[in-house]
Amino acid sequence: MGIVIREEDIEHIRQIADRERAPFYVVGETTGDHRFVFEQTDGVKPIDLAMEDMFGKAPRTVMTDRTVEETYEDVTYDQTQLDEYVERVLQLEAVACKDWLTNKVDRSVTGKIARQQCQGEIQLPLSDCGVVALDYRGRAGIATSIGHAPQAALVDPAAGSILSIAEALTNIVWAPLSEGLDSVSLSANWMWPCKNEGEDARLYRAVEACSDFACSLGINIPTGKDSLSMTQKYGKDKVYSPGTVIISAGAEVSDIRKVVSPVLRTGIDSTVYYIDFSFDKLKLGGSAFAQSLDKIGKEVPTVQDSEYFANAFNAVQELINKELILAGHDISAGGMITTMLEMNFANTEGGLEVSLDEIPKKDLVKILFSENPGILIQVEKTDEVEKILKKAGVAFIRLARPCDERHLLIHKDGADYQFFIDHLRDVWFESSYLLDCKQSGEKAAKDRFLNYKEQPLQFHFPDSFTGTLAQYGISADRRTRSGVKAAIIREKGVNGDREMAYSLYLAGFDVKDVHMTDLISGRETLDDINMIVYCGGFSNSDVLGSAKGWAGGFLWNEKAKAALDRFYNRPDTLSLGICNGCQLMVELGLLTPDHEQKPKMRHNDSHKFESQFIGLTIPENNSVMFGSLSGSKLGIWVAHGEGKFELPYDKERYNIVAQYTYDAYPANPNGSPYGIAGITSADGRHLAMMPHLERAIFPWQCGHYPADRKTDEITPWIEAFVNARKWVEHHTK
């Protein structure tokens, strides 16, 4: 990056850059003469321009085009083939499960992720929006969502723009926004095959409609980008990408803990409501249903009344702020039938009994598969909810009630239609499996497909756990030093230092940031430190074996090695290595110093990076940090590509303190023997583990957390850090 700083600050910035091993160069100076000049050492100036030459007159592009009317064949169908239609729609890439994509990206990095892609006890990618906390206090945050409608835009580019905005908004509506709809800003990314007859005219209509709809809602589009060359030649053939706009929505969140999940709550006497945001008649054009039949359709839905849309949005916001919605999900790709199914997919029990009689439309296919913007909400306090909706002038229909049977039982005009949730969930997941075969191989992909629904998260908390900070005598408001010192050891490229530092601070440590350059130079000796933590991330670079480079920093630098040796020779010290830090501790042989053959960390059996919120079981153990958690079953994050423990000796020779709850993939994400997730030194002082407990110390950080513990301030993982602090206090008296 380039920065402009005062001359007197150069040396300070240089010192910071040197510490972080970041190359730093002074490349020029400001002159105030309104000229942009590059001058060589020989005095030649290859660039010497007045600023007005670059910014005085913005370049203009004139596009001349004519409107080309396109007509597409309408959708024809037979209502008796509903079962086949549902399965065809669920297998479309736009509708089907995205597990193949979401499981290979770090969805917990920073520890501030309050809502990522996956939901429920079997962690399926169903989230409508993403939410990131602004800090670890867990209140304010930022929500994001996206929307697009490429098929609809083929039929009507104006409607395509409106539907894209509508989808982004019905996705982000589930987060309590600080000022409701007024909080939202949009980004418009245009993907269009311009310079082909008719396409520039279509783009004009699309942009105009996008602007008009946003203005009518009172929200802005301050940014975006375009890719207007979406045309590819294959020999003599020319292929156009369907012109579409991808809308990204962003907004400030008032309370990240109130974000509504799409997962239906079971075992509660409740009602599911349908709220239409479109005010339009049901249409199948541009839908996933039409695409599944190799059609596009003639008529696409739109939003007929932007004022009504805004009122409905803000009414739902009021319900969320008052915590009156148990679960909610938008209607978009795949229609209402997909929405109802997805609300049940992440559960292991229960279903829905649905009555469509209050919907005046007789055409069941249109009711179930049209993609008119709308939502479904599950509520318990029906009278209070209906009062708020009526006051806002928002129409609603009582659509369904949860049931114990694992099905959707849909009633319409005297006929019943039954859909089995678990079967259709496999249909929905199958497309992900087929794509995963290309990246994980047939075996791992098949194991994932067979096991995903057999490995629900399990929770068993310590009997003494109350979920309060007060239980541990700690406070997020502490501003005085405790005198118990911990240090975060960083190498270039690590990314888990901030959340680890906060976890240590919250537990009562005074935390010090130590970079490897501090140890190598001798600026830091660790002599006054009682606990060190090697944090997670990718030391040096995002490649396999990166911990070897980090280990070399200790082994081949005299001062760093001496500091480390002195630390481990003291009887009053603890250490913790997470993820890349775990790999480092194993590489340095810190866990089994008396073993002739040392453990190794190998590439995951899936041969790819794995990011999941999974179950961890803490066996009976004598470790400092996990001893009091013995017998617990908790949820935790993993994010690694090289997490498989390879042990040269029998299991009994290792102090195993953490195991994946299920031994089979993907709940055992790397193939470690015995499901090993963490081991300690024989005396229990030095712990190395692949999962990130520092990213799961608060319920809002967890991919799933028991609903009956909604008021918990903290998760049991904080106990591990508190145990460490108390041990240090006891051993340094």
Image (spheres, helix red, strand yellow):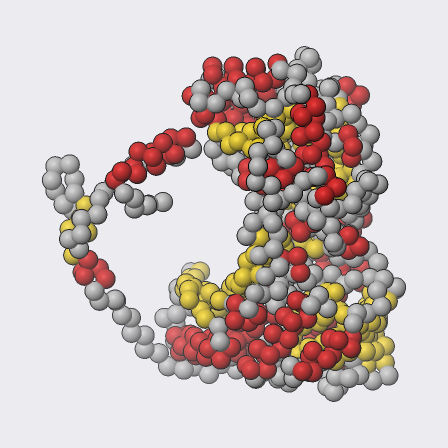
Measuring from the top left, give residue 613's x and y in whole percent: 69, 46
Measuring from the top left, give residue 484's x and y in whole percent: 61, 28
**Against 682, is 149 above or below?**
below
Q: Nearer the viewer, residue 311 or 104?
A: 311
The quarter of the picture where the N terminus appears is top left
Measuring from the top left, give residue 652's x and y in whole percent: 80, 21
Residue at screen point 73% across, 27% down: 624
Question: How many callouts does the rendering have?
Answer: 0
Q: Is residue 224 left or right of residue 34?
A: right
Task: Name which quarter of the figure residue 21 lies in.
Answer: top left
**Against 6, is 422 above or below?**
below
Q: Is residue 322 visible?
A: yes
Residue at screen point 74% across, 26% down: 623
Measuring from the top left, give residue 197's x and y in whole percent: 39, 76
**Against 185, is 397 above or below?**
below
Q: Is residue 19 left or right of residue 670?
A: left
Residue at screen point 62% across, 63% down: 175
Q: Is residue 254 left or right of residue 69?
A: right
Q: Nearer the viewer, residue 698 or 154?
A: 698
